[in-house]
């Protein structure tokens, strides 16, 4: 420590652009179990002709003398299929599928899987019971499409953070309901859990409202060669095991993201991502896997292993300041380079501009609301060129302004939100709203007014 710091002086350094809150951020629940108990349930779903398939696997702890009864109930609480034992397949003729927001009515259709255990133990007979919401849907990726229930799906949504005034990162139901209200208002059908797993209640809301999730693990800031060591890789795999174990049964989760903006052009990143991605696919063969890159397409060593290319770029923000006229060319080149190299669907997983609410400037200058709007407009023109070809999504950075460390680059936090930290709209929110509803109308309900249809059905209006 240089001599201009007091002896023993310590400051924690973080290598990411959000605030490193401390303390308990979520509820802590204590629970008891019977001697023999249901430890875990894994559900995967499929569709065969007009029947839904629900495959279940149940793990029971501390007992060998037990019976399991499994029942699937529809939204009216009617039993539609039943089974026994630790694994099996339930068939639901004429199943109601789980669809993303705007592709079907709200709320999204959920069945309930009831698992009832009875066991003989040394202390006598015991029983255990668990109910799991189940959405029947399929996810698949082709060379140029992301399919949900066999239909091309276009992610039009946001990146978020668990962050707000007063509460910081602490879980807060009213805030969550407000955020969902805004997502539905916006016509957003998806978000990425940048840059860590969110509270389970968030995913439960996504299941209910059909908000599709790219579920990201906390691997943000893998930027130094030593971050790609075997120790780090093994730890990363354990983290993916925890994430998959926790979130595997959420129909809303359609893809795992194993990292955000790692130094994936380093030689060692190739082996590292091959191993982490292969491991994640083995844990959950039912979902595609990605990581979010900002490396050059020709240098990225991890991209060969992902199912979908998720690419971040900040044209006319972190370079070519003010030169909005370059965006379309640069974005088009970015997409073409990635696609010709990998022939995989692409999501623009971040783009945006820092904007201080209430700053106005004509002609648009950086940090003004007009600049954010103009930058988005240029991106949208570039995205529209490739949408329907092989670009399968766009996620704005960021849903709302959020707190960061203090640095000369940040004015009271990161201000790239389309909403303020208090969830008030900037001008860009209205622009994005028009766009998302337009995309929804074009692609989902070509003959009807999705906007009024969906707003009428919204539980929040
Ligand atoms: C990024 C990061 C995100 C930052 C954002 C920004 O690429 O993934 O964590 O907050 O850029 O605003 O610079």
Image (spheres, rainbow, N blue to C red):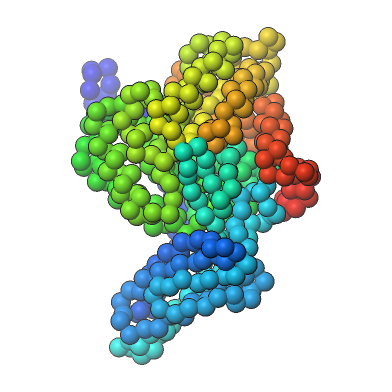
What residue is shown at x 35% (from left), y 88% (from top)? 120
Is 346 displayed left or right of 360 in the figure?
left
Q: Residue at x 38, y 42 (%)?
A: 258
Eyeballing the image, is 346 above or below 48?
A: above
Closer-to-camera residue (53/40)? 53
Instruction: Out of 460 and 87, give the one closest to the viewer.
Output: 87
Q: From what the image shows, is residue 68 above or below residue 323?
A: below
Q: Residue furthest bottom?
A: 124
Which quadrant does the N terminus fall into? Answer: top left
| Residue 304 seen in this snapshot | yes
Q: Is residue 184 positioned above or below 41 on the image?
A: above
Residue 9 seen by the camera: no
Q: Position of residue 127 (x, y in %)?
A: 43, 82
What percent of the width, then of the height, locates residue 88?
Answer: 43, 73
- Image spot of residue 7 (x, y percent): 23, 26
Tell whether 281 sits left or right of 403.
left
Q: Residue at x 30, y 38 (%)?
A: 273
In this rendering, is residue 315 above or below 135?
A: above
Count of numbered marks: 0
Q: Position of residue 125 (x, y in %)?
A: 39, 89
| Residue found at x 63% / y 67% | 94
Question: Hey, which residue is sitting farthest front in the picture?
Answer: 49
């Amino acid at each position: 420590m240089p001599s201009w710091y007091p002896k023993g002086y310590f400051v924690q350094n973080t290598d990411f652009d959000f605030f490193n809150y401390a303390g308990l951020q979520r509820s802590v629940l204590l629970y008891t179990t019977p001697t023999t108990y249901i430890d875990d349930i894994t559900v995967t779903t499929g569709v065969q002709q007009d029947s839904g398939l629900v495959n279940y696997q149940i793990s029971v702890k501390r007992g060998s003398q037990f019976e399991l009864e499994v029942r699937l109930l529809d939204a009216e609480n009617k039993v539609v299929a039943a089974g026994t034992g630790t694994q099996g397949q339930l068939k639901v003729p004429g199943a109601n599928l789980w669809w993303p927001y705007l592709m079907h009515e709200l709320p999204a259709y959920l069945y309930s899987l009831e698992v009832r255990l009875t066991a003989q133990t040394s202390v006598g007979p015991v029983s255990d019971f668990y109910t799991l919401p189940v959405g029947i849907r399929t996810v698949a990726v082709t060379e140029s499409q992301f399919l949900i229930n066999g239909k091309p799906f276009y992610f039009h949504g946001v990146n978020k953070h668990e962050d707000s005034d007063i509460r910081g990162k602490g879980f807060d139901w009213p805030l969550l309901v407000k955020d969902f209200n805004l997502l539905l208002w916006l016509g957003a059908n998806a978000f990425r859990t940048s840059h860590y797993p969110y509270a389970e209640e968030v995913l439960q809301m996504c299941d209910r409202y059909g908000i599709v999730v790219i579920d990201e693990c906390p691997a943000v800031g893998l930027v130094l060669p030593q971050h790609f060591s075997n120790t780090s890789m093994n730890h990363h795999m354990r983290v993916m095991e925890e994430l998959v174990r926790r979130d595997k049964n959420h129909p809303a989760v359609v893809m795992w993201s194993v990292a955000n903006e790692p130094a994936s052009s380093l030689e060692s990143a190739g082996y590292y991502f091959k191993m982490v991605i292969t491991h994640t696919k083995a844990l959950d063969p039912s979902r595609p896997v990605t990581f979010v890159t900002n490396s050059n397409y020709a240098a990225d060593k991890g991209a060969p292993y992902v199912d979908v290319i998720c690419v971040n770029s900040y044209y006319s923000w972190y370079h070519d300041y003010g030169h909005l006229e370059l965006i379309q060319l640069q974005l088009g080149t970015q997409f073409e380079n990635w696609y010709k190299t990998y022939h995989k669907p692409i999501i623009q997983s971040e783009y945006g501009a820092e904007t201080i609410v209430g700053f106005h400037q004509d002609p648009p200058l950086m940090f003004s609301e007009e600049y954010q709007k103009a930058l988005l407009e240029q991106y949208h023109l570039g995205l529209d060129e490739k949408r329907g070809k092989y670009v399968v999504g766009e996620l704005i950075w960021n849903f709302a302004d959020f707190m960061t460390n203090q640095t000369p680059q940040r004015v009271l936090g990161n201000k790239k939100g389309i909403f303020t930290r208090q969830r008030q709209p900037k001008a860009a929110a209205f622009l994005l709203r028009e766009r998302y509803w337009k995309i929804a109308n074009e692609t989902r309900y070509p003959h009807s007014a999705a906007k009024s249809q969906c707003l009428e059905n919204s539980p929040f209006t």
